[in-house]
Image (cartoon, helix red, strand yellow):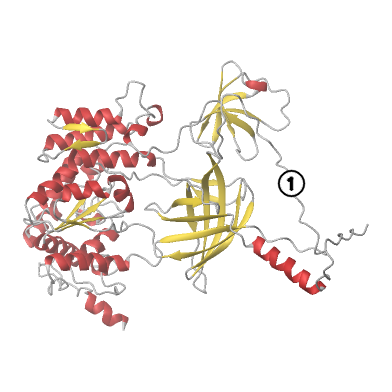
């Protein structure tokens, strides 16, 4: 049937057909490119894309978080990203996935969420990413007036029980659920409408219906199975110590666990201090008793086995103290060292031969215990430890320390700091001599590297992967130990009970000129007000990314910034890039070191 013609509403002549078509095309183009929402965020230290999103109506922004998987660069210099995560909409998290292409500073791609499909356009602006979600392009049709068909209804509409009005995809591990499966009209569970009671464990549901279904794990697909919460899910990750204290069961603790705010107050009182909420009032001498209080409070916040041993914390402090400058002018404040298992601390201590050589050839009189801390020479150098077993080390921090002790050019010259790495100085004797020279130069210049958290945070664990139910793509699962939601409480406990007193003691000595936070998580957890209060008259620099953060283009420009800060405070160092004068660890002749000058010459 032909479409009826519209009635005329005025005597004015109709516009020519091409004009009406052009207007409709312009309207369609404007509608197709009208933003659905805008996202602004950055990659955190674990490689996740986090930030806030907002609607065009100017309503308050909400948070989002995506895990990021990258693919190798293509021949044209572009690379692809797969983002999988959730954004908060209507008071509940909504599953969302994007496939993006980054070419130069431009970002484009497609996405799919629980609300619908969309296009993505955006740009990289320094460390920040700014994205817009746009409506999907209409499918081509034979008629200009044909509208795309409506999206098909979902195959399953999850039923809601009266016990909850919150739902997210996927539910968190440990969630209590009611479930049914397609075609299971005769379900005999004890929940509403015959739903089965169960608990989500490692992606499977485990029966929790006494006498009906107990214990046997069954595969679970939150995108297809009919499910709802049996009880309200745990709130979003806590942003304060008080919020974290409401989750004792999820941290493996019983109902009698002491809340963290109370733990802070009790620990402060035992050491003659007073706590007001999340802050310890005033400053005190950083005694071992305070260090032990901070360690105990952190371990109480973590699940059993996730808190590092007290012997490790004491060993870490002995390393920090050994390399403390007599006059501290600059403090580089990182997040934490890496968790070290007690058996590794024993089996990987410096071997007797290594200790003898270090003392004889370099006058080293520092600690010999093994810890996954940059100051420990055995970390990353398996030939020096007693068991001879491999360990990855932390090459990014060695380059950072080298930059802090040298005059690094700006712009940074690629590979100019590789002499502290195995690919830059393959011979062990020369590499160890170079590392010791770096540590000695920092001590002489007045630069001190410290960590905010008193316990090792990152626990090495096997990588786990899951396949997306909606796209079939495989994504790496975020590490579960320790839970990321507890990082801020652990950083705050460490800061308030110990680290702020260390920094204030240095500031009171009168030589400290600059405090440089390393890592946005440290900056966000502690806050600029706390930093300024502890640093006294010293300047608090803008935070720099953690050296192990994923950054487009690499960390090179920040090496130059660290070098410039230390040069401005400590003075230029003409000899900082010279080959070390210390003798090698063994008898053969030392190979020539790759100094920044040689690296630049090779690059030319």
Report the label total. Answer: 1
Q: Quadrant of the C terminus?
A: bottom left
Q: Position of residue 2 (x, y in %)?
A: 92, 59
Q: Nearer the viewer, residue 58 or 6?
A: 6
Check disc 1 and report the residue beneath it: 152
Q: Quadrant of residue 161?
A: top right
Q: Secondary structure at mark 1?
A: loop
Q: Residue at x 82, y 72 (%)?
A: 17
Q: Nearer the viewer, residue 302 or 14?
A: 14
Residue most extreme to the bottom: 604
Q: Residues within 10 Å of mark 1 (few under 14, many from 20)?
A: few
**Picture coordinates of residue 444, whole percent (x, y):** 9, 62
The structure residue drawn at horizontal position 15% and vertical position 48%, both measured from the top left corner, is 503
Q: Which residue is situated farthest in the right direction here?
A: 1
Horizontal side of residue 96 vs 505, given as left or right: right
Q: Nearer the viewer, residue 567 or 459?
A: 567
Q: Is residue 196 visible?
A: yes
The quadrant where residue 410 appears: bottom left
Residue 341 visible to an observer of this rendering: no
Residue 378, x across and y down, in percent: 21, 53
In the rendered image, the quadrant that contains the N terminus is bottom right
Relative to 210, residue 21 above or below: below
Residue reaching furthest front? 11
Asked if residue 244 lies left or right of residue 205, the reply is left
Where is residue 557 shown, x and y percent of the image?
Answer: 31, 68
């Amino acid at each position: 049937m032909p479409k009826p013609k519209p009635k005329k509403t005025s005597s004015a002549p109709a516009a020519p057909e091409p004009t009406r078509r052009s207007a409709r095309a312009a309207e369609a183009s404007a509608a197709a490119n009208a933003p659905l929402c805008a996202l602004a965020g950055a990659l955190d230290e674990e490689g996740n894309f986090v930030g806030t999103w907002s609607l065009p109506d100017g309503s308050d922004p909400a948070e989002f978080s995506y895990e990021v998987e990258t693919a190798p660069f293509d021949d044209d210099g572009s690379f692809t990203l797969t983002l999988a995560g959730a954004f908060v909409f209507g008071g509940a998290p909504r599953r969302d996935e994007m496939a993006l292409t980054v070419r130069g500073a431009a970002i484009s791609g497609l996405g799919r969420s629980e609300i619908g499909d969309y296009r993505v356009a955006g740009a990289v602006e320094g460390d920040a990413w700014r994205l817009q979600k746009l409506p999907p392009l209409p499918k081509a049709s034979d008629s200009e007036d044909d509208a795309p068909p409506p999206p098909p209804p979902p195959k399953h509409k999850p039923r809601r029980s009266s016990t909850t009005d919150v739902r997210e995809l996927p539910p968190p591990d440990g969630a209590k659920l009611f479930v049914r499966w397609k075609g299971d009209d005769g379900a005999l569970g004890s929940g509403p409408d015959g739903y089965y009671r169960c608990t989500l464990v490692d992606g499977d549901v485990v029966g929790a219906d006494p006498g009906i279904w107990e214990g046997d794990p069954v595969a679970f697909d939150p995108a297809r199975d009919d499910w709802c919460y049996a009880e309200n899910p745990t709130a979003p990750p806590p942003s304060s110590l008080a919020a974290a204290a409401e989750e004792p069961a999820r941290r493996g603790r019983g109902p009698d666990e002491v809340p963290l705010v109370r733990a802070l107050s009790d620990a402060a009182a035992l050491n003659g201090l007073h706590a007001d909420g999340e802050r310890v009032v005033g400053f005190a001498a950083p005694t071992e008793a305070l260090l032990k209080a901070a360690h105990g409070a952190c371990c109480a916040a973590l699940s059993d086995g996730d808190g590092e041993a007290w012997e490790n914390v004491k060993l870490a402090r002995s390393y920090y103290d050994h390399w403390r400058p007599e006059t501290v002018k600059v403090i580089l404040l990182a997040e934490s060292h890496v968790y070290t298992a007690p058996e590794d601390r024993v089996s990987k201590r410096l071997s007797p031969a290594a200790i003898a050589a270090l003392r004889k050839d370099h006058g080293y009189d520092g600690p010999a215990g093994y810890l996954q801390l940059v100051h420990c020479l055995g970390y990353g150098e398996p030939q020096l430890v007693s068991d001879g077993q491999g360990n990855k080390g932390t090459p990014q921090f060695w380059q950072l320390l080298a930059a802090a002790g040298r005059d690094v050019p700006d712009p940074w010259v690629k590979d100019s700091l590789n002499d502290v790495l195995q690919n830059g100085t393959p011979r062990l004797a020369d590499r160890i001599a170079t590392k010791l020279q770096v540590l000695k130069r920092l001590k002489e210049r007045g630069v001190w590297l410290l960590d905010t958290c008193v316990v090792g945070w990152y626990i090495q664990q096997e990588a786990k992967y899951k396949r997306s139910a909606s796209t079939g793509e495989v994504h790496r699962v975020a590490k579960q130990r320790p839970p990321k939601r507890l990082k801020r409480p652990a950083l705050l406990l460490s800061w308030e009970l110990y680290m702020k007193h260390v920094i204030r003691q240095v500031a009171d000595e009168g030589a400290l000129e600059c405090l440089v936070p390393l890592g946005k998580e440290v900056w966000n957890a502690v806050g600029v007000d706390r930093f300024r209060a502890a640093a006294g008259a010293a300047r608090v620099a803008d935070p720099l990314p953690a050296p192990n953060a994923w950054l487009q283009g690499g960390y090179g420009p920040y090496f130059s910034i660290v070098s410039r800060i230390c040069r401005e405070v400590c003075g230029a160092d003409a000899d900082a890039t010279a080959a070390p004068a210390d003798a090698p660890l063994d008898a053969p002749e030392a190979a020539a070191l790759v100094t920044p000058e040689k690296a630049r010459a090779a690059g030319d």
